[in-house]
Amino acid sequence: MSLCDLTVHEVLDLIKSGEVSAKEVRESVLARIEKVESRVCSYITMTPELDSDGAFHGLPLALKDNICTRGVRTTCGSRILEHFVPPYDATVVTRLKAQGIGIVGKTNMDEFAMGSSCENSAFFPTRNPWDLDRVPGGSSGGSAAAVAAGEAMWALGSDTGGSVRQPASFCGVVGLKPTYGRVSRYGLVAFASSLDQIGPITRDVLDSAILLSVIAGHDPLDSTSAPVPVPDYVQDVRRDVKGLKVGLVREYLGQGTEDGVRSCILKAVEVLTDLGAHVEEVSLPHTAYALDAYYLIAPAEASSNLARYDGVKYGYRAEGAVGLLDMYQRTRREGFGEEVKRRIMLGTYALSSGYYDAYYLRAQKVRTLIRMDFQKAFSEYDVLLGPTAPTVAFRAGERTSDPLSMYLSDVCTIPINLAGIPAVSIPCGFSGGLPVGLQIIGKPFSEAIILRAAYAFESSTDHHKNRPALTGEGGEA
């Protein structure tokens, strides 16, 4: 196994013992990028000059391209921001740099984080390293694929409806969505402001705990950032799970969940039971309405947030326009992709006079019911379990002409965003040779508990140790 395939904590131990140098690790990652990037297509922009100072020796991290970086373009996977270069760093970037974590590049994504396959990027689709004919998931597909393929040691993505966890599941890595407000969103280009959250994508749970420790904490620059103390995730993660009360969510294993996925989840339940956890089935009865509520709330917020891209302040401006209104219309028509236009129109309609109460307001009431479902469940259980996605990674192009089937990819992750609670996806097996993700869900600000459950499971299995051979279109790496 190459250095670029190791976890961050493994590499840090090797550097500390003097067996390898940080420079060798960085060069191993850059060599892997040169070898496979033309086929995986994880990155939109490369920033390979890695500073070696700090606690993490410049170990290469991949950053989703909707997180602002001073002096480095931030495109959000969109033509409308193709040449946008932010004059400041996002808070998470400032914290990464302060700890000596190097940013090796900005990763590909579904445009403005709207998608579940990384095929909605304005530039190119990203491929799944486990099978290059399949999607890596989305919208943080570039970050997940980079970590899985050894093109980064770890990564950050954003999760609005599952965009960290679902690609982590598809790519066989660990993806954590923290509690809403746990990690600053200052410098994250907004999609749906009441749902967006930045989270780690790593090779194992300990790395996720390490990275969360770096980026978590209150930030006065983000009015939604919670002034809640940050525990020692790294220390807490190693505690056992004996006596842990676990609820297996019935609705997440129902119709639409593939047999192979269901089988992996039930085997994972057996592992946790053997470790001393007490597992029972639990119901979240309003789950069936989560997708409908999300696709009113998120587009409504997107229609408001994306109104700023009008060709006047920054970003793309259409040429040859006659008058201000024509310039607005041409800029947005030419600058936005089809999925973004679809969601802007849906959101604008839901917020329009005469329809606000019937759609947006009703969706917010459903959101409250979903949150209450979780509150009731957590009055009895410490964590909840289910699949991260109902299927394994699907073939490229398979769902691009059917938006509804694409949206169903996030049916198990969306309720967590609506409730604002944390969840982590970890590898728990394979179905048809493709990774399956186990989702562990916690009450607000209980990241330490879900990471502890994830670490206990991971320590008893080998699923996270598998690495893709990069087979499929184009042959092996």
Image (cartoon, rainbow, N blue to C red):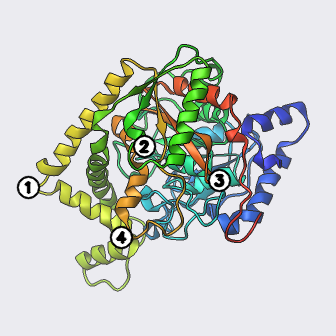
Along the viewing direction, whichever of 153 and 259 lies nearer the viewer: 259
Numbered label attached to residue 433: 3
Question: Is residue 309 rendered to the left or right of residue 273?
Answer: left
Dividing the picture into quarters, in which one does residue 405 lie? Answer: bottom left
Hey, which residue is sitting farthest top in the picture? 243
Label 4 vs 1, first from the N-terminus: 4
**Can the viewer see residue 90?**
no
Which tag, 2 or 3, sits closer to the chain's start? 2
- In terms of sequence position, does the residue under pointer 2 or pointer 4 come before the other? 4
Q: Is residue 450 above or below residue 84?
A: above
User: Marks 1 and 2, Cα distance to the nearest angstrom?
Assistant: 31 Å
Circle 4/circle 3 CB separation < 8 Å: no
Mark pair 1, 3: CA separation: 50 Å
Residue in the picture at 51% in, 27% down: 447
Q: Amino acid at mark 1?
A: Gly
Q: Which mark is residue 413?
A: 2
Q: CA distance from mark 2 to mark 3?
A: 23 Å
Measure how far apart labels 2 and 4 are at the Cα level: 34 Å
Find disc 4 in the rendering and name its residue: 311
Circle nearer the N terminus (4, 3)? 4
Task: Tell me whether the residue at label 1 lies in contact with that at label 3, contact meaning CB atoms closer than 8 angstroms.
Answer: no
- In the rendered image, residue 61, in percent from the top left (x then y), is placed at 66, 48
Q: Which residue is mark 1?
A: 354
Label 3 SS: loop
Q: Nearer the viewer, mark 1 or mark 2?
A: 2
Query: Amino acid type of disc 2?
Result: Thr
Callout 4–callout 1 Cβ contact below 8 Å: no
- The image shows residue 209 at horizontal and vertical percentages of 61, 31
Q: Is residue 417 visible?
A: yes
Residue found at the far left of this picture: 354
